[in-house]
Image: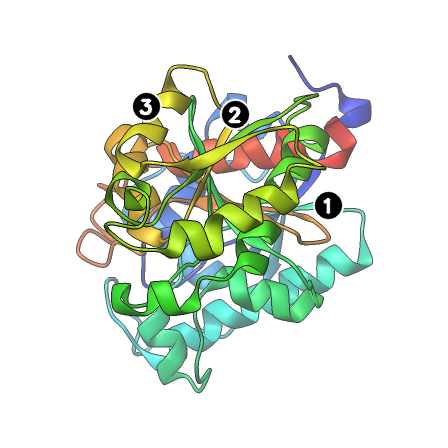
Amino acid sequence: MPISRLSRPSVVITLGDPSGIGPEIAAKALANPAVKSLADFTVVGSTFVFDKTIRDLRLKFSTRNINFVNIDNVPQRIFAYGKSDPSFGKASMQYLDKAIDILAEGPAKSLVTAPINKASVCSAGYVGFQGHTEYLAAMTRAKRFAMMFVGEKLKITLVTRHMALCDVSQKLSTDAILSAIELTGKCLKNNFKIRSPRIGVAGLNPHAGEGGIFGCEEIRIIAPAIKKAAGGVKGIVGPVSPDVIFNMALDGKLDAVISMYHDQALIPFKLLYFRTGVNYTLGLPFVRTSPDHGTGFDIAGKGRADPSSMIEAIKLACRLSPEAR
């Protein structure tokens, strides 16, 4: 459905790591007439890098309907595409901080973030930095938040995110699973307008533990969370064997899946939506989406970056923005 000018959202876009493909995919996405007409955009980043990217890659780009907030923080003498550097990590975080300020002031209600490089950010002094999701939650004081991946026929919310596989079972808790279920149910109702969400909860172990033969997490941790959630989310099932649950969602039997750990979700998701998947953060005071890929240092500055995921992230941010609902 077309978005009228009266209800057109205001969306903030950060360019991510200046050395990565963020400026390229942002420029390519915003050059798409169908995307550009969806919202009034504010782009936060370095005009030096953005203009250089457009010039070097010979991209066609118009600034109409786009407000650019220039953060002049990229040392031109050392700039290079595809390079991890503390100054670039610091720059990407300053873009994000400025975007948070803009959102706090209004009227923008949605944020789209281009990829950042965790190594560059950590080397810039952001000790313990885990990613956009955790940082945005901390800066907005969000008490409960989660990472959801959105594709055409599949939505997956993670209980745990970036951690070693050997730590997952120790980090899982009934409260964490319950929080992911409740955030997902609320999102499906309020944002995706699904009146009675059907949510499937994946097991941790093969065959969902097979009654405790292959592990007891399903009995001790996951099943109690499902029982607690059942009062508020009527259409909940699980724990379901991880090798079955994603097919159930693709067959239309589930509106979303709760996944216990990162690769349990991301392997099937990226197999299906490698080019078009979107990362959506639940629990923030504003809509936040991002392309489901990294900084692409190996192809940065070569004009080969595919903007499809960025385009879908912008479309989803516009669709879920309060002005467009």
Label 2 crowd bin: few (<14), some (14–19), many (20+), radius 10 Å: many
Under mark 3, the amino acid is Asn
In the rendering, which numbered label is found on residue 173? none
Residue matched to label 1: 109
Residue that lies at the very extreme toward the left in this rendered image: 298
Q: Which sits in the foreground, 324 or 193?
A: 193
Query: Looking at the image, is mark 3 or mark 2 earlier in the sequence?
Result: 3
Residue matched to label 2: 255
Left or right of 30 in this view: 19: left
Residue matched to label 3: 247
Q: Which sits in the foreground, 90 or 189?
A: 189
Separation of marks 1 and 3 at Cα, in angstroms: 34 Å
Question: Do the CB atoms of the residues marked 1 and 3 lie less than 8 Å apart?
Answer: no
Q: Secondary structure at mark 3?
A: helix
Question: Do the CB atoms of the residues marked 3 and 2 lie less than 8 Å apart?
Answer: no
Left or right of 237 in this view: 22: left
Percent x, y of residue 11: 65, 43
Under mark 2, the amino acid is Asp
